[in-house]
Amino acid sequence: RMGPGVSWLLGVLLALRVSPTRTGVENSNGSRVTQQITVSGVSSGGFFAVQFHVAYSSIIRGAGIIAGGPFYCAQGNVDIALTSCMRTPGLISVDELVAITHSTYLTTRTIDDPKNLSMDTKVWLFTGTEDTVVNPGVVHKLQSYYGNFGVDEIKLVDTVPAEHSWVTDSYGNSCSFKGEPYINNCGYNAANELLTYLHSTSGKGNLSSTSVHTSLNNFTGTNKSSKGGGKLVKINQKTFVPPGVIPAAIGLHDTAYAFLPDGCSFGGQNCDIHVAFHGCLQGIPKIGMQFVNNTGLNEVAAAYNIIVLYPQAMATLTNPKGCWDWWGYSGEDYSSQ
């Protein structure tokens, strides 16, 4: 079940009236159109984006991971998460995690067939050389993990002297700074690099602009203007959790956002979808709208007509830093559909 993040995305896709598959989507009129759905994340969001990608490899076309590690790295154990998966990557057995991935699919069918990962998938990886939170070797292990599944198009960026952060070329703390909002200005535009890499072969067609615009407005409430040639659309996450469940009880903030480029609202232009998962201490209650507004994703998305979804986790007693669940705080089936 992988916590609330997956149901949130699938709920949004249903609200947009699409039935996602690996090779495209079926529009509301029954026609099949080319679509790319990709994910990205930093730190806990990076680990979670990998989980998301592996669990739903039938619909996710690519992943951009900053300071994240392999699927099921923590194996449901917070001590492993804090040691092997963050500080001592030499303890990570890629062979074991690959075997677990295969066996999970074969014995439980709670993740998609990992063979999907070899089908025209792109992966973009980043680790800062000065990252003192997630050792660069963890990202190297992730590169090996994806390679074991036949992912041919993997780009690794590991030469930028960045601390633990989402890296930009215009916003944030100094490149070597460690701390909130965990967005650092290193003169490197990670958003542009990952989005253009993941979507470079896309025809950028999924839904008609009218369908996207109408469907979003049907369930999001008030639009808010944003820089970057588009609008930020507020989303009530309560709409996409099980009936009777309070979002905070499962680690979700009440509000998430989607960036809707002007080209997706007007002029008949079709759009791809990208889902961006923030890291620990980067949710709205902690740093406000900085992750939504200042990673650079919206500006690139506006240029290439990509809708960006920003689900929002929040702190709870079992998750005091507002991380996405990649070690099991939400239950033993945290890494499955």
Image (cartoon, helix red, strand yellow):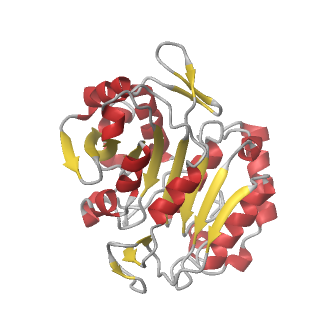
For the point 44% across and 36% down, the residue is 271
Residue 24 location, quadrant = top right
User: Looking at this view, is 270 or 154 the one in front?
Assistant: 270
Q: Residue furthest top?
A: 29
Whether residue 334 is visible to the viewer of this picture, yes or no, is: no
Q: Is residue 134 above or below residue 118?
A: below
- Image x and y of residue 200, in percent: 57, 49
For the point 57% across and 66% down, the residue is 68
For the point 66% across and 41% down, the residue is 111
- In the image, taking residue 163 as reference, residue 34 lies left or right, namely right
User: Looking at this view, is 333 or 307 the one in front?
Assistant: 307
- In the image, taking residue 251 as reference, residue 51 lies left or right, namely right
- In the image, taking residue 91 as reference, residue 218 lies left or right, namely left
Number of numbered discs overlaid on the protein picture: 0
- Image x and y of residue 106, in percent: 79, 39
- Image x and y of residue 199, in percent: 55, 48
Q: Quadrant of the N terminus?
A: top right
Q: Quadrant of the C terminus?
A: top right
Whether residue 11 is visible to the viewer of this picture, yes or no, is: yes
- Image x and y of residue 262, in percent: 30, 40
